[in-house]
Amino acid sequence: MSTSLDNRGAVDFKSIRPLINDTLPKLYIETYGCQMNVNDSEVVVSIMQNNGYSLTQDMTKADLILINTCSIRDNAEQRVWGRLDVFKQQKKKRSVLVGVIGCMAERLKNKLLEEDKVVDIVVGPDAYRDLPNLVHGAEGGQKGINVLLSREETYADLSPVRLDQNGVTAFVSIMRGCNKMCTYCVVPYTRGGERSRDPHTILREVQELADNGYKEVTLLGQNVDSYLWINPENQDEEVNFAALLDMAAKQNPTMRFRFSTSHPKDMTDEVLKVMAAHENICKYIHLPAQSGNTRMLKQMNRGYTREWYLDRIAAIRRYMPDCAISTDIIAGFCTESEEEHQDTLSLMEEVGYEFAYMFKYSERPNTKAQRTLADDVSDDVKTRRLNEIIELQNRLSLKSNQKDIGQVFEVLVEGTSKRSKEELFGRNSQNKVVVFPRKDYKIGDFVKVKINQASSATLKGESVE
Ligand code: SAH
Ligand code: SF4
Ligand code: F3S
């Protein structure tokens, strides 16, 4: 495996901040779903900006409204339908084009054009380069759709226009799609097969962010541990995720790195060693368990058992005793019994997660679970189990945060606290939110903060420099 990367390939990183220009036609964009969708919207804005559009934050002034959508659970799609009703009101008042892009576009395809008169264009996650063309057609009254999935598209050469407000933290996609085929999940269908982005372009993008004052980069993929780039011109040159992380951390030693999402089946000790070796790689791993019961995990096609998962947790603790761990949990998956639900609670307790994203199982059309398993846990029982999971996690988060009282953490300042203008907030390496008095510090500073107060959601403290 080669870890040295030369600087080849021409990547044009010019427009890192949004272009606001009153004379150009205006794009308004809303984003739902995961971090990958947030980053995709930045790619979309870059494409539209290169084609003569400028960005507006005001929907009522837009010539083109795009909604980047999520299909992961039914309620995610319901929110989008709600927004389409709002856009319909806009359309009654004036001439404006509406486009649905992202995962729901991919899942529902033509249905979006047929069922909802408001939609002019439908574009799936691999077809964004075709957007200007489709918009042009729609301007001439021709509704358009492109939902082709690609085996190659990674938008590697495009420079995302950063839509974040802080100018400090940014997402960089390192791969697209997913091959895992968890039985409950729509992502393999909406995003297509897995492909890894050329590491040269990833490192270039990170460098560009550093040059523009960014202090933290989160490397994104549905399963970053299966990142594998093979040089098409030299099949012996391979870069896996551990190597990519190592190169990024070395290239920009003052940039802080995070990544998401890790997969329990694929996360290697090699990655953990690289994390432990670099101060600038955050000590935080999001390692979704989904369930603590081996039969459930098998039924979900997750590819690991409870014991395997706990072995991975033990490995994390071995290499990095101070590493924070978070998870995703699904409550009430098909045929889940009360004992199996208890296994999830006991797993959570055993790991002692710092944080968790917790969901009720939502059956998705055309997934393997929908086709072959009974969604037979009643909604009441799902809700009760989810509440137990949430309650437990609140306790675990509080316990973990209380242990931090008296400790000093380096915090990267991201903004002003919502509660008070006199306070700033940021995150520590463990991804915990820390609030402290502003003094003369500003956004983008690294500040040493001593913790003196903890709730289940936040740490509070005083700067000690
Ligand atoms: N690739 C990541 C996460 C992708 S989706 C991973 O595998 O961990 C984010 C989370 O949504 C999943 O981890 C899962 O907990 C949840 N999720 C996915 N499909 C779901 C469904 N049909 N119902 C409820 N939750 C779901
Ligand atoms: Fe979905 Fe599983 Fe892929 Fe995650 S790993 S995106 S849950 S199929
Ligand atoms: Fe949603 Fe698509 Fe992400 S379904 S979670 S936006 S990959």
Image (cartoon, helix red, strand yellow):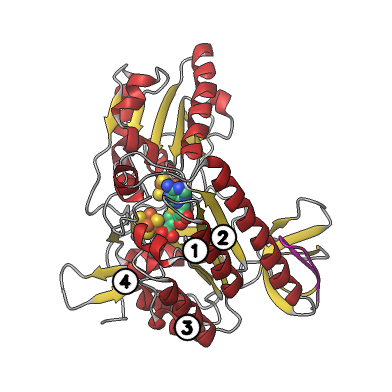
Q: Amino acid at mark 2?
A: Thr
Q: Are marks 3 and 1 in contact (CB under 8 Å)?
A: no
- Circle 4 Cα neighbour tier, 10 Å, few/some/many (<14 / 14–19 / ≥20): few
Q: Chief secondary structure of the magenta span?
A: strand
Is residue 395 visible in this depiction of the protein?
A: yes
Which element type, helix, strand or loop, lies under badge 3? helix
Q: Are marks 2 and 4 in contact (CB under 8 Å)?
A: no
In the rendered view, tell whether residue 360 sits above or below residue 429: above
Is residue 102 visible in this depiction of the protein?
A: no
- Residue behind label 2 places its C-beta within 8 angstroms of ligand 3: no
Q: Amino acid at mark 3?
A: Ala
**Quadrant of res 147:** top left
Q: Amino acid at mark 1?
A: Thr
Residue in the foreground of this view, choosing between 356 and 7: 356
Task: State the separation of the CA atoms marked 2 and 3.
Answer: 28 Å
Q: Which one is in front in this view, the residue at disc 2 or the one at disc 3?
A: 3
Report x, y in % for residue 229: 26, 69
Residue where numbered disc 4 is placed: 7
Residue where numbered disc 2 is placed: 169
Report x, y in % for residue 320: 55, 84
Q: Earlier in the sequence, mark 4 or mark 1?
A: 4
Task: State the separation of the CA atoms marked 3 and 4.
Answer: 35 Å
Task: State the separation of the CA atoms marked 2 and 1.
Answer: 8 Å
Magenta region:
452-463
Q: Which one is in front in this view, the residue at disc 2 or the one at disc 1?
A: 1
